[in-house]
Amino acid sequence: MEKSKKNILVPTDFSRVADYALQHAVRVSEVVGESITLLNVVSNASEIGAVTEKLNQIAESTFQKHSIKPRVSVAVGDIPDEIARVSEEINASLVIMGSMSVKGKENLSGLRTLSVITKAKVPFVTIQEPPINRRYDNIVFPIDFTIENKEKHGWISYFCDFYVSKFHLIKPNISDPELVAKIDLNMASAVRYLDEKGAKYSIYTVPGENSYQEEILDLAVNIRADLIVVMTARVTDKSIFVLEPHEQFIIGNAGHIPVMSINPR
């Protein structure tokens, strides 16, 4: 993974939860050394001047507090489209965005946050609360049977390069032989990446007493996870991605734990 000339994109609507996202971005920036770009999307070009001034005030305040001064950007148009476009334009490594609208939701269908997640080509980190820890030291990787699941294993290198992370690989409790075989293949792929990087990891099989997504969140809370990594799925049109219901549930109910959503390439 390229370490230079990358940026962390933080879309903001000037809300409290958007400030939480900026706090998370600052902590990531302090570790990985990437610049932060603050973005606001407006519906009319006449708003650009006033919005730019507000962004500059936030950037200056951030510099005074953390010695990191975000760049500022204002775009005109549709919010999901512009976030996706700007993330490519600035060579973003991550989009970190606060979204109070997802809090407690089991289904994100129809929410703007879902549209943004499934359009951005770079990983999207959803924030609901302020950061608790400074680093991503305990990372939860749910393992399922989909082909796309293997793609997030490449991010193991990113976390190993910048963090001393321990990975918690979680398997569902199922008995279908065909699905078990697919999950075992994905698990073997993850373990291979981890062994190559000399990373620490643990493997868990959930009890199967509740839904997989509920048990993932229970385990994440119990181990004090700093991040949960999920994958979207590619539909027939390769340019369209969807979040399956269990991933939507995780994003909506993760609370203080950030959730990284990765679109397969």
Image (cartoon, rainbow, N blue to C red):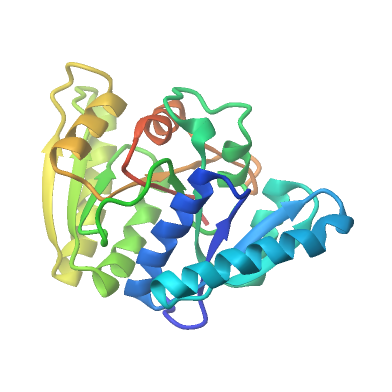
Relative vertical location of residue 146 with respect to residue 5 in this rendering, above or below: above
Instruction: Please report the residue visible at 19 percent of the width from the left and 62 percent of the height from the top.
Output: 165
The answer to whether one can see residue 2 in this image is yes
Residue 7 horizontal/vertical position (percent): 52, 72
138 sits left or right of 158 in the view: left
Q: Residue at x 61, y 31 (%)?
A: 111
Where does residue 117 sit, x and y in percent of width and height? 55, 45
| Whether residue 124 can be seen here | no
**Residue drawn at (53%, 28%) of the image:** 108
Q: Looking at the image, which residue is at 13% across and 55% down?
A: 201
Relative horizontal placement of residue 46, taking residue 114 as reference (left or right): right
* Residue with the most extreme top position: 209
As rendered, which of 58 and 221 lies closer to the eye?
Answer: 58
Q: Position of residue 246 (x, y in %)?
A: 39, 28
> Is 23 or 166 nearer to us in this picture?
23
Snapshot quadrant of residue 247:
top left
Q: Quadrant of the N terminus?
A: bottom left
Please tell me in which quadrant of the rendered image residue 166 appears: bottom left
